[in-house]
Amino acid sequence: MFTTGLQSYNFEPMSRIALNARLLIPGKLEGTGRFTHQCYKRLIGSRPNDDFLLIFDRKPPKDFNYGLNVEAISLLPPARRPWLFDIWFDYAITRKLKTWKADIFVSTDGYISRRTDVPQLNVIHDINFEHNPEWLPSRYANHFKKRFPEYARRASKLCTVSEFSRHDIADTYSINS
């Protein structure tokens, strides 16, 4: 179930790959945003015959033009608060995956839809909120603690960025690593 990075995931031959692009914010790429940008750039570049859908929760910026086989769209509502995360991933994303006929949904920020049958590759970088909830506003820490165990179990494939995180997620959420 686990892998330690998108590059090590063996995508089956497919043609329609939907990508969570929520954290691709021009001029404001933080750690997960930079990771997302580099992974998507490499993934799309390595699969020129497939179609990709970058799904933003704001107007798609022109800064992330990865190729002619990529379409960028925006879905409402903007996912900026825990309750909006649920609406965006569970309803807006689910609906778009179905209408676009996605073969897989890739999410690099730990969130996936709880309402779709489309296979989902989920990247959970770490679960520091489980061990140090005081580092976050309580509404975020509580939301993450409630949702991430389910996201980890629902993912068709779960990725992480290190062996430490792999073991931590597996042990904390009782998932086979």
Image: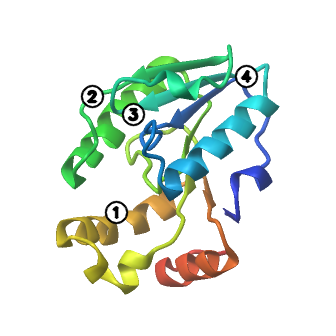
Q: Nearer the viewer, residue 64 or 124?
A: 64
Relative placement, left or right, of 79 versus 26 is: left
Q: Is residue 121 visible?
A: no
Callout 1: few (<14), some (14-19), or many (20+) C-alpha neighbours within 10 Å?
A: some
Q: Could you tell me which secondary element the residue under label 4 belongs to?
A: loop
Q: Which mark is residue 93?
A: 3
- Identified by mark 2, the residue type is Leu
Relative placement, left or right, of 24 versus 80 is: right
**What residue is rendered at 27% in x and 47% in y?**
86
Relative placement, left or right, of 46 versus 169 is: right
- Identified by mark 1, the residue type is Arg
Residue 16, position as x, y percentages in the image = 64, 24
Question: How far apart in space, not on screen, are marks 4 and 1 (Cα)?
Answer: 31 Å
Q: Nearer the viewer, residue 13 or 142?
A: 142
For label 2, the residue is: 76
Sequence-wise, which precedes: disc 2 or disc 1? Answer: 2
- Identified by mark 4, the residue type is Asp
Q: Where's the C terminus, which quadrant?
A: bottom right
Q: Which mark is residue 50?
A: 4
Q: Are marks 1 and 3 in contact (CB under 8 Å)?
A: no
Callout 4: few (<14), some (14-19), or many (20+) C-alpha neighbours within 10 Å?
A: some
- Identified by mark 3, the residue type is Ile
Q: Which mark is residue 147?
A: 1
Question: How far apart in space, not on screen, are marks 2 and 1 (Cα)?
Answer: 21 Å
Front disc: 4 or 1: 4
